[in-house]
Image (spheres, helix red, strand yellow):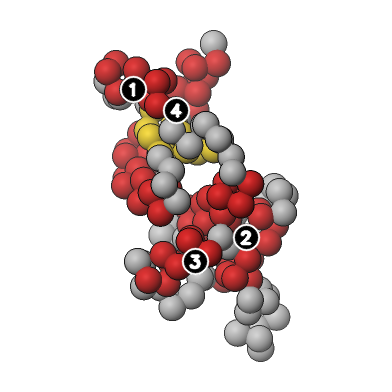
């Protein structure tokens, strides 16, 4: 890895919250993060904005979420602290189980809110305030209006 000029420092994953890192290694059984994921750790932990470009299945969700969840844990964020916006309901429905797993590692919750979510589920989301809310641009607009 050190011979690649675009490689992140080898200790970059160690910046992640210990629980997140533990589950990456032991639950997901990953030998390491992808280059994009490593490169995202320090800037996102530091509070910088980032634009992550990778092909489908290139690891963008994990590149964004592992540092974000680590900050959530390190800084003890409370209530709905992360808004994950996707253009398609189908993509949100596909991502939800992964993000529910990742948030669950830290004793946190994720929930999906879009046009197909039932009224009873929306009421539960309002009452229980998930830490991470996954939504579409249209649903976000409806929430704000």
How far apart are the two marked residues, 2 and 1, measured between alpha carbons? 33 Å
Between discs 2 and 1, the one toward the N terminus: 2
| Residue pointed to by mark 1 | 124
Residue 93 - label: none
Please state, as top left, top right, bottom left or bottom right, where the N terminus lies in the image. Answer: bottom right
**Residue sitting nearer the eye, 26 or 139:** 26
How far apart are the two marked residues, 4 and 1, measured between alpha carbons? 8 Å
| Residue pointed to by mark 4 | 129
Q: Secondary structure at mark 3?
A: helix
**Residue sitting nearer the eye, 43 or 73:** 73
Number of the front mark, 2 or 3: 3
Q: Secondary structure at mark 4?
A: loop
Please state, as top left, top right, bottom left or bottom right, where the C terminus lies in the image. Answer: top right
| Residue pointed to by mark 2 | 40
> Neighbour class for label 4 at 10 Å: few (<14), some, many (≥20)?
some
Between discs 2 and 3, the one toward the N terminus: 3
Point 43% across, 33% down: residue = 130
Q: Secondary structure at mark 2?
A: helix
> Neighbour class for label 2 at 10 Å: few (<14), some, many (≥20)?
many
């Amino acid at each position: 890895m050190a011979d690649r000029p675009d490689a992140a420092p080898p200790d970059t994953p160690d910046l992640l919250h210990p629980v997140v890192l533990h589950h990456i290694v032991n639950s997901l059984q990953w030998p390491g993060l992808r280059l994009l994921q490593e490169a995202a750790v320090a800037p996102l932990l530091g509070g910088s904005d980032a634009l992550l470009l990778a092909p489908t299945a290139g690891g963008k969700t994990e590149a964004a979420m592992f540092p974000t969840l680590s900050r959530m844990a390190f800084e003890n964020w409370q209530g709905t602290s992360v808004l994950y916006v996707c253009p398609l309901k189908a993509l949100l429905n596909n991502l939800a189980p992964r993000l529910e797993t990742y948030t669950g590692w830290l004793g946190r919750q994720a929930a999906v809110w879009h046009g197909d979510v039932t009224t009873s589920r929306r009421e539960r989301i309002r009452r229980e305030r998930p830490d991470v809310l996954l939504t579409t641009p249209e649903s976000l607009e409806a929430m704000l209006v």
